[in-house]
């Protein structure tokens, strides 16, 4: 990833916090779509920074035609559909339910996986484009083990309705965290899904065909290496939908020992029982534990999540062959394949061998046949584009022209993704264009904003607009404007704080050339205060040249207020270190009075007009009420639960 491009803070948010941000802005449905001029445009201005970052950074964004997100109405799960390239046909790929710690992880997974599906579908000679669904399992309700089956069904029904709203530019399927029964729930709300249960006329679980394809890739790799699978030792990462049948098939082929790892401790007994009597070792590991890749074996088969082959893991791999079903195994697609080659490791690109899941379900509307020749040719040795023969050809070409297997396979796939569907043309792109113009989609995009400020009497229908720019350093911290009189306000821009007169239209600098960009300001009682991201503080008396500058310690200054506390003018600084720092502005200088400790990061504090009470709120739903004594001390009166309690003074 390019480190020199500043990452917007919105991408560091946990998905739950991102949902909160959307709700605060009246957003429930959103999109990012590539225009004809190559620009990537977000549906809402607040989200454009995400589009700009991924387009400029370009590690995972690859001119994707569009990606669409929504918060499911009932279950409040963050759901999405990523569409990469649709020249061959609509974007096709499974919907993944997974844990994401940040929104950057969420977006990157969708971008990588959808691009990988473009390559996989093209190499398989399918007339489908690349697409992928992503759900944040750790949002809303319905996707965690403790949630009810009814809530889970609702999640997937809501996703099905979401797919229908996209008009077929993306067609879903089973994937990590999504079962065939989940697909049945989707199918009840949309026709844009595959892997439909066999009892409903579909192809069912694609995991066994996927495992068969990986076996064929392994057989090609072992032949190229001059070795045999019989008697080999194999390490398998992930004993899930694909890993389980893969292990069964490898034992049937005479593999002598298999070491496997999985993160799901609830399945340990089930897995061990499945392979009882076999030379099988199971390691239950924590998420992110890559030790299975470092086993002293003949081959490693990644069958869990992607981005596991990188500068940290590759040097520790002892196996001669890496070949598995996991998508997007390389973290850095420009360098990691070269490092594998340098170390003499035979790497089989995932999209070369894990095609059979999508092959099995892509054309299920064409009807079912026993031992379908349309499917079996992918697993045989006669067709030149079969997994076995194409894998061998890629290995030989890589050796012949001194390129990596990733480069050879990617070149083949890229050329094929540019082929336009002979019957329908570039239909997916047209669907997206017409979707954005439709009244239905526009209504979804406007969402909760339709009934917000535009219908409120206190908002002027024709507001005056003044050309004053404001610089936002933090998506939550926006106390960057303060009204000091009817015709004057103070605002922040970059490293300067100025006052602006709306009648004369003249601006007057109040604080210039600051060594930080303010994240919050306060102006009252003849004083101006500005705070920064790293607890910087500067205070100025507006009717004189006096000012004071210091660092208050702690973390981000979330908000500040200046007001009278009994007979004293004081400045309150609400900080992320769970304190309210109190300063006296009575002079001489800036005097620290006290620091009030709270059990949460403090977002705001306010003092009653008579200066007798103070109230504070933070990152929880609690409200903290304090008495301000005659001597200026602060004594907590009560803690209230926001929205559910009331207290009369």
Image (cartoon, rainbow, N blue to C red):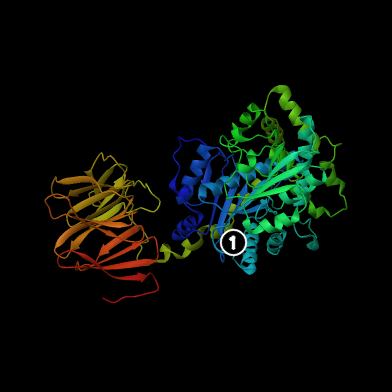
Residue 119 is situated, as x and y percent measured from the top left of the image, at 69, 40
Q: Residue furthest top?
A: 401
Label 1: which secondary element: loop
Query: The C terminus is located in which quarter?
Result: bottom left
| Whether residue 321 is situated above or below residue 271 in the rendered picture | above
Residue 628 located left or right of residue 325: left
Q: Nearer the viewer, residue 254 or 539?
A: 254
Q: Nearer the viewer, residue 343 or 367?
A: 343
Q: Residue furthest left?
A: 588
Q: Which residue corresponds to the image point at 74% horizontal and 46% vertical from the top-left?
A: 424
Residue 552 is situated, as x and y percent measured from the top left of the image, at 26, 49
Residue 161 is situated, as x and y percent measured from the top left of the image, at 64, 61
Residue 192 visible in image: no
Q: Quadrant of residue 512?
A: top left
| Whether residue 218 is situated above or below residue 176 in the rendered picture | above
Q: Quadrant of residue 572?
A: bottom left
Q: Which residue is mark 1?
A: 144
| Whether residue 568 is situated above or below residue 417 in the rendered picture | below
Residue 60 is situated, as x and y percent measured from the top left of the image, at 57, 40
Residue 143 located left or right of residue 577: right
Q: Nearer the viewer, residue 609 or 590?
A: 590
| Whether residue 401 is situated above or below residue 251 in the rendered picture | above
């Amino acid at each position: 990833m390019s480190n020199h491009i500043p990452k917007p803070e919105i991408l560091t948010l946990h998905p739950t916090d991102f949902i909160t941000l959307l709700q605060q802005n009246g957003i429930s449905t959103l999109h990012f779509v590539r225009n004809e001029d190559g620009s990537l445009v977000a549906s809402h201005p607040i989200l454009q920074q995400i589009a700009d970052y991924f387009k400029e950074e370009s590690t995972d964004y690859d001119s994707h035609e569009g990606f669409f997100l929504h918060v499911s109405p009932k279950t409040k799960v963050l759901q999405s559909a990523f569409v990469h390239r649709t020249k061959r046909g609509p974007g096709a790929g499974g919907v993944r339910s997974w844990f994401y710690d940040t929104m950057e992880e969420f977006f990157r997974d969708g971008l990588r996986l959808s691009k990988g599906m473009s390559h996989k579908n093209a190499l398989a000679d399918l007339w489908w484009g690349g697409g992928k669904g992503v759900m944040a399992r750790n949002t809303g309700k319905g996707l965690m083990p403790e949630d009810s089956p009814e809530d889970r069904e609702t999640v997937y029904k809501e996703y099905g309705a979401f797919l229908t709203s996209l008009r077929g530019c993306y067609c879903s399927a089973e994937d990590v965290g999504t079962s065939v029964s989940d697909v049945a729930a989707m199918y009840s709300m949309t026709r844009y899904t595959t892997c439909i249960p066999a009892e409903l006329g579909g192809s069912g679980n694609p995991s066994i065909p996927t495992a068969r394809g990986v076996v064929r890739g392994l057989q090609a790799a072992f032949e190229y290496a001059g070795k045999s699978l019989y008697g080999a030792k194999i390490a398998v990462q992930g004993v899930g939908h694909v890993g389980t049948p893969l292990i069964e098939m490898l034992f049937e082929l005479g593999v002598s020992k298999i070491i496997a790892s999985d993160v799901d401790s609830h399945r340990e007994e089930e897995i061990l029982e499945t392979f009882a009597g076999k030379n099988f070792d199971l390691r239950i590991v924590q998420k992110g534990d890559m030790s299975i890749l470092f086993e002293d074996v003949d081959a490693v088969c990644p069958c869990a999540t992607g981005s596991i082959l990188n500068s940290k893991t590759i040097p520790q791999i002892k196996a001669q062959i890496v070949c598995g079903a996991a998508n997007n195994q390389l973290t850095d697609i420009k360098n990691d394949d070269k490092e594998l080659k340098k170390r003499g490791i035979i790497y089989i690109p995932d999209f070369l061998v894990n095609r059979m899941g999508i092959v099995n379900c892509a054309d299920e509307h064409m009807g079912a046949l026993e031992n379908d020749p349309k499917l079996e040719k992918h697993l045989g040795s006669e067709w030149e584009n079969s997994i076995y023969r194409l894998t061998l050809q890629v290995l030989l070409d890589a050796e012949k022209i001194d390129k990596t297997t990733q480069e050879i396979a990617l070149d083949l796939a890229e050329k094929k993704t540019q082929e336009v569907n002979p019957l329908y043309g570039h239909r997916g792109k047209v669907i997206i264009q017409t979707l954005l113009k439709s009244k239905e989609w526009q209504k979804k995009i406007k969402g909760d904003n339709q009934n917000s400020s535009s219908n409120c009497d206190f908002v002027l229908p024709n507001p005056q607009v003044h050309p004053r720019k404001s610089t936002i350093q933090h998506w939550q911290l926006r106390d960057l404007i303060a009204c000091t009189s009817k015709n004057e306000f103070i605002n922040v821009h970059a490293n300067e704080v100025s006052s602006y007169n709306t009648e004369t239209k003249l601006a007057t600098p109040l604080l210039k050339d600051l060594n930080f960009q303010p994240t919050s300001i306060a102006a009252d009682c003849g004083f101006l205060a500005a705070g920064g991201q790293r607890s910087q503080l500067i205070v100025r008396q507006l009717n004189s040249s006096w000012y004071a500058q210091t660092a208050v310690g702690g973390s981000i200054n979330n908000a500040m207020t200046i007001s009278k506390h009994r007979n004293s003018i004081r400045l309150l600084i609400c900080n992320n270190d769970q304190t309210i720092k109190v300063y006296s502005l009575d002079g001489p200088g800036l005097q620290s009075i006290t620091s009030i400790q709270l059990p949460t990061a403090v977002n705001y504090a306010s003092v009653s007009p008579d200066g007798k009470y103070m109230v504070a709120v933070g990152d929880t739903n609690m409200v903290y009420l304090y008495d301000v004594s005659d001597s200026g001390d602060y004594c907590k009166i009560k803690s209230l639960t926001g929205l559910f309690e009331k207290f009369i003074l």
